[in-house]
Amino acid sequence: MEATKRQKAKLDDKSTKDDYKCGACLKVVHDQDNGVMCEICNNWYHCKCQGITEQLYQILNQYGAELHWFCKGCQMGANKLLALLTRMQTKVDKLEEEITRTRSDIRAQMNTNFQQLTADLDKLCHRCDENDKKVDEYKSEMNITENTKTMLESQTISNKCELQEMQKKITRS
Ligand SMILES: [Zn+2]
Ligand SMILES: [Zn+2]
C-alpha cells in the first residue's frame, strides 16, 4: 500500500484532478473521500467502489508502509501469477526429484559395472595363473622326456660296446 488519502494530500499541488479518478466509477476521489491507491496499476479507488470496509481503511492508513493493497483487477492478475508460480514450483520439484533419482540410478549402474569388471579381472588373473601352471607342467614333462632320451642313448652306446666285445670274442675263437 503506497498511498492512502493521507499521503495523497502531499501530491495534490503537482497533480491534476484526473490523477485521482476512481479506477472503478471514474469519478474523482476527493480529499474528503476514503480512497486508496493500487500498488500495481497506481490507480486511485473509492473505498466503497472496492468494497474496503472502514475498519480495513483505518488499518491501511495506519500501516500503509508495511501493507500492500491491490485493486480487484490487479488482484485477479496476481492470483493468476501466483497459480502459475505454484504450477512452476511443482514442475521444478518434480524435476529435482527426477534428477536425484537419475543420479542414484547412474551411481548404482556404475557400481554394478565396476563389480562386474572386478569379477572379470579376477577370472582373467585366475586363468593366467592356470596357464603358468600348465607351462610349468609342460616344462617338467619335457625334462623327463629329455632325461629318458639321454638314458636311452647311453643304453644304446653300452649295448653297442657289448656287441663289439662279443664280435671280438667270436672272431678270436
Ligand atoms: Zn469509485
Ligand atoms: Zn490495480
Image (tube, rainbow, N blue to C red):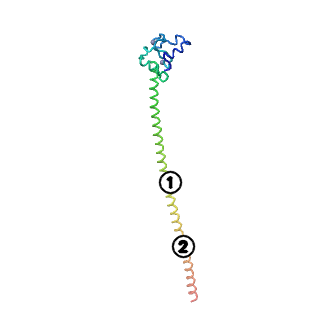
Image vertical order of residue 101 relative to residue 147, above or below: above
**Residue situated in front as seen by the camera: 75 or 49:** 49
Foreground residue among 49 and 10: 10
Name the residue located 51 percent from the left edge and 57 percent from the top edge: 125
Front-most of residues 148 and 131: 131
Label 1 C-beta lies within 8 Å of the nearest ligand 2 atom: no
Q: Residue furthest bottom?
A: 173
Q: State whether residue 92 is above or below residue 60.
A: below
**Dividing the picture into quarters, in which one does residue 151 lie?**
bottom right
Circle on res. 147: 2
The secondary element bearing badge 2 is classed as: helix
* Residue holding disc 1: 121
Element class at badge 1? helix
Q: Position of residue 42 (x, y in %)?
A: 51, 17
What residue is at 55 percent from the left and 12 percent from the top?
A: 13
Q: Position of residue 48 (x, y in %)?
A: 42, 14
Q: Quadrant of the C terminus?
A: bottom right
Is 169 on the left-hand or right-hand side of 68?
right
Q: Residues within 10 Å of mark 1 (few under 14, many from 20)?
A: few
Cα–Cα span, label 2 and label 1: 39 Å
Which one is in front in this view, the residue at disc 2 or the one at disc 1? Answer: 1
Residue 81 spot, x, y in % from top left: 47, 24
- How many numbered discs, if any? 2
For disc 2, does the CB lie below 8 Å from ligand 2?
Answer: no
Write down the quadrant of residue 76 in the picture: top left
Residue closer to the observer: 74 or 85: 74
- Vertical position of residue 112 compared to residue 21: above or below: below
Q: Kindly give the residue lying farthest to the front in the view shown.
A: 62
Instruction: Find residue 52 and report its horizontal and vertical position in percent.
Output: 42, 17
Amino acid under disc 1: Leu
Residue 45, placed above or below residue 81: above
